[in-house]
Image: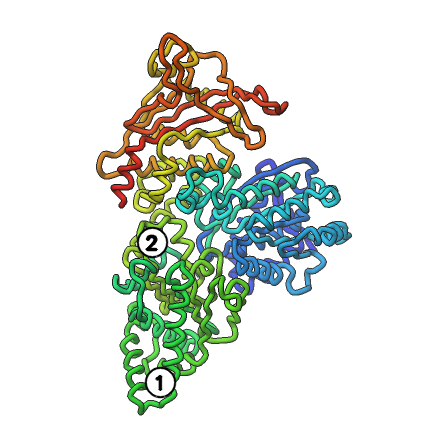
Amino acid sequence: MEIEILQNKKEGFTPIIGEMTIDLLSRLKAKVDSEGIDVLQKETIDILSKCTNPNKRESQSITNLVVGYVQSGKTMSFTTLSALAHDNGYRIIIYFAGTKNNLLSQTTKRLRTDLINGSVNAKHYKLFENPTKDDSQRIRNALSMSTKPTILITVLKHHKYITELATMFNNIQLKNTIAKSGVLIIDDEADQASLNGYAYKNSKSEEWEDDEYTTTYSSILKLRSALENHSYVQYTATPQGPLLISIMDLLSPKNHTVLTPGKGYTGGKTFFVDEPGLIITIKQDQVYHSKHNDLTNCPDSLINALQLHIMGVAIIVYIKQKESFLSMMVHADREQDASQKFYGWIKNLIDAWANMLAYGESDPAYQELRSSFHENYVEAIRLYEKYNEPYPSFEEIWHYVYDIILDTNIELVISRNKRQGENKEIDWSGSCSHILVGADMLNRGFTVEHLAVTYMPRYSVGKSTADTIQQRCRFFGYKKNYLWSCRVFLPYEVIIEYREYVEHEEEMRNWLLENKSLEDVERLLLISNRLNATRKNILSKDTVTTKLSGWRKMNAFQAIPENISFVESFLTSHQEWKLFKDYGTEDRNHAYIKVPIQEFIEFLTEFKFQNMPDAARKQATLRYVKYLSTKTNTPLTHGYIIHMAYASREARLRAFNEDTQRLVNLHSGRSTTSSSVYPGDAAIKFEDSLTIQIHKVKLKCDSVIWSGREAYTLAIYYPEDFAINYVETEG
């Protein structure tokens, strides 16, 4: 087999295209045109060239970000990346394959099909799903084989399984086997592995230390620390999370790649800009919410959607024969009871329609149903007519309706239904028509094959976050063959949110394409007014009133050199420092500056935190300040930065817990021992805006590693009146 060496002008790792990459790309040509193959190859080389060199026997690690559209081919990208990694000496590839078992199974199956190719490439790849310590010997055996197979490990994105994997790789025998061999970690839907949603999902607790994803993230850190030479590649279609919640602090990505969708891709721009006729508005009284509008009868809009789906199957599958089946997705609400309710309505309708048609055309029920379908015929062929696409008559369509109804497979995809839940595999080729009913399990990462009609009456009391609503877009994908039969039923408010998001997404992608630095992109995302429409108030009231009120003291002891360099540069670049109040000693005298809100944002953006709770606080604060600065009435225009003990040559000594890497107490308390009363560090603040205190501390503990180290950390004051006004405004 000829090996192609690709010259890379920059210094660093230069990948080669070898046997397994050539094999995979040749098989992908059956569904991707030559131009698409060229783009796929080029972008895969770009991704791997930014990773560590697997053949360089030294400790290395790097994190990179890969951004694609929803349903645009990210799985194909990381599958090709896997083949290229194999050809270049990576011996282990780990896949964080989603937070649900159906996504894990989907990824495992895809790798087995595309990479192992049945058993054809079994000597090149060995696949393990959620391995335990019992699999350790088999993995060691495979690593010792003369054929040098690459070990593929798919694992559920859950702390239990990732921790077990970390424990396995810390085992001395396996650790010695892989030594400094290259390991590639591919994190599918990477924003879920970071802090995505901390600010609103975990709003009930008073602090971030015990929030939901802390354990998952900690397990990822354990795994990474067990691997001496590894690359961590984050794939996502919604980088708002990775960028806005400071994945840069937590996982420190150095590079990014933006994936190019194939020619046939139909995404947000297609549905909400180019072809808005694909969207149908669900009337307000038919929009579902389990508490505010718990529907008791099947809404007419759902009946219309079902009939459009069936007629679409008649046109695309039977008459035009462009696809072998079409699917419909119904996403009513995150509550599983809602999915069961809609599933019952749909099943009853399909069964009733089958019975009506069985009576024969002379029966009144038959005629009534035929009339109902005929009323929706105009909508079924509307876009065909608009774009001069040939379309069949109603009689031609009606001829197939009975068979389609009889051949419709209805699936309830929820976790409580084990038969049709997490472990359910859809037999796509078994029916010409599929209807899938569910919520969270049909969200992020799940592929609904040949999806044409989407019915999503989900009602949100507050404004949705951009990345969350985008991940519900299972209706994006490669649909050029049947686009004119696609329809998406949505509430009016959700349609507006999607339109706003599409504009934001396109600008964000342009920023990513034009900027080499992820830090520049993060700053643009935070400061640009173009984000106002989609990211106004996405913090819950509980988050603001419990976590963003009063003093919050932070611990920045993982990026000490970077923060020292940044803070000292910031302090010397400003000459306008003013004394807060003369309290008589250097340790108690503090200087402050009042800065424009944009500079306040930039300061907090640049200051680094690499622990989960404080990185979450940083992000929530940035979102909060962004919201406050864009309020229609009395926008926040400034903030305060206070240099604590500014004239002191010595850092302030503070007790430090080396296990938690947190200070015992940052603030000095109130004192009356001197000639003047010192009110305590907590009194050094302003009430008309947020205040950041910069503290230079010297750590006091028993640890040889930590004791005596000096570092900068922050304390932030959130005026309580701001929290009260926030709740009143958004209530």
Point out the image quarter for the N terminus. bottom right
- Identify which amino acid the numbered label 2 is placed on: Tyr
Residue occupying the far bottom of the picture:
362
Q: Few, some or many C-alpha atoms within 10 Å of disc 1 (few <14, some 14-19, many ≥20)?
A: many
Point out the image quarter for the C terminus. top left
Q: Earlier in the sequence, mark 2 or mark 1?
A: 1
Pointers 2 and 1 in contact (CB under 8 A)? no
- Residue topped by disc 1: 356
Specify the quadrant of the image occupied by residue 218: top right
- Identify which amino acid the numbered label 1 is placed on: Met
Q: Few, some or many C-alpha atoms within 10 Å of disc 2 (few <14, some 14-19, many ≥20)?
A: many
- Residue topped by disc 2: 498
Q: Nearer the viewer, residue 283 or 452?
A: 283
Q: Nearer the viewer, residue 198 or 83?
A: 198
- The answer, for residue 94, to whether it is visible in the render is yes
Distance between mark 2 and mark 1 Cα atoms: 39 Å
Q: Is residue 573 left or right of residue 726?
A: right
Residue 42's disc is none
**Residue at the image point whose x is 65% and y is 65% from the top:** 118
Where residue 667 appears, as percent x and y from the top left, is 44, 23
* Secondary element at image label 1: helix
Q: Is residue 535 left or right of residue 611?
A: left
334 vs 504: above or below: below
Q: Is residue 514 left or right of residue 424?
A: left
Residue occupying the far top of the picture:
675
